[in-house]
Image (cartoon, grey):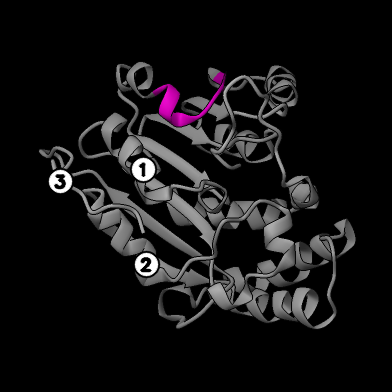
Amino acid sequence: MANTERAGEPFVYEGKDLKAMDFARNYHDWILSKFDPFVGQKLLEVGAGTGSVSRMILDRYQKETWMLEPSEQIDILKFTLTSLPNSMPAHPVQGFLADHVEHLKHLQIDTVFYVNVMEHIEDDRAELRHVFDLLKPGGHVLTFSPAMPWLYGRFDHRIGHFRRYELRDMKEKMRLAGYEVVRAHYVDLPGMFLWWLMFHVFKFTRLSRRSVRWYDKIVIPVLRRLDPSRVLPWGKNIVVVGKKPASSSLPSVLPEAA
């Protein structure tokens, strides 16, 4: 999800080749488990897409949740949410975060999810500052993003990734935006090597449902049992959680984005 739309033109999501990931339920459950200790009472998911993660957030936390999606996928998201039985109140909203900060600020949001979304945002530093502005003091921003810049390739570019992250860089961006970094580590070391083989050695052009389901069914349960994440020096992804201090304001002077 890139925030580079032009005035008067509809925003079109470029990452439809990631659709196969909608079937990775164990994978997404594993991601959310990393966030459990930091989830509050009023939730916001940015870049909700068609709602594959939204369904799990609602089911897992049973909290009132807002979902932002700027692309044409908002219609599918709305249909997905209306078809959910016995869910907590869900509020799908079309647009980018920057357009809704003032409205969302009044809702006392204390938890914001970015699951495989921040890499689609061109100015991620500005995005983190927007989140800081709307978050309730003591609230958290929860990010899960692709890692290892050396893994960036044609597939990343084609699905709208502006970058892959180094852990230290994301931590620094969080701190510059005013957050206290309360969790930060790499995850999925096996996936790093598989990504390199698939998209750099064998030059795959898409993720297949079959390969995603295999990885989700076989590899993810093993990783969950071993869970070496907190000590991994590398990984296919990073988890970074920032906390807005209980008594704080956005720094009045911030470095310009690189």
Quadrant (top left, top right, bottom left, bottom right) of the C terminus: bottom left
Q: Which residue is mark 2?
A: 169
Callout 2: SS:
helix
Residue drawn where x is 86% and y is 56% of the image:
209
In the image, residue 148 sits, relative to residue 157, either above or below, namely below
Quarter where residue 4 is shown: top right
Residue nearer the viewer, 13 or 30 = 13
**Distance between mark 1 and mark 2 Cα atoms:** 15 Å
**Which quadrant of the rendered structure holds the N terminus?**
top right
Q: CA distance from mark 2 to mark 3?
A: 19 Å
Which of discs 2 and 3 lies nearer the camera? The answer is 3
Image marks 3 and 1: residues in contact by CB distance under 8 Å: no
Residue 253 image label: 3
Q: Position of residue 223 (x, y in %)?
A: 61, 73
In this view, the residue farthest toward the left is 247
Residue hosting label 1: 126
User: What type is the residue that disc 1 sits on?
Assistant: Ala
Question: Looking at the image, which residue is at 60% across and 22% down?
Answer: 87
Quick one: 119 or 229, which is closer to the camera? 119
Q: Residues within 10 Å of mark 3 (few under 14, many from 20)?
A: few
Badge 2 crowding class, 10 Å Cα cut-off, few under 14, some 14 to 19, many 20 or more, is few
Q: Position of residue 142 (x, y in %)?
A: 42, 48
Name the residue type under label 2: Asp
Q: Is residue 79 above or below residue 111?
A: above
Q: Earlier in the sequence, mark 3 or mark 1?
A: 1
Q: Residue at x 70, y 23 (%)?
A: 84
Q: Which of marks 3 and 2 precedes in the sequence?
A: 2
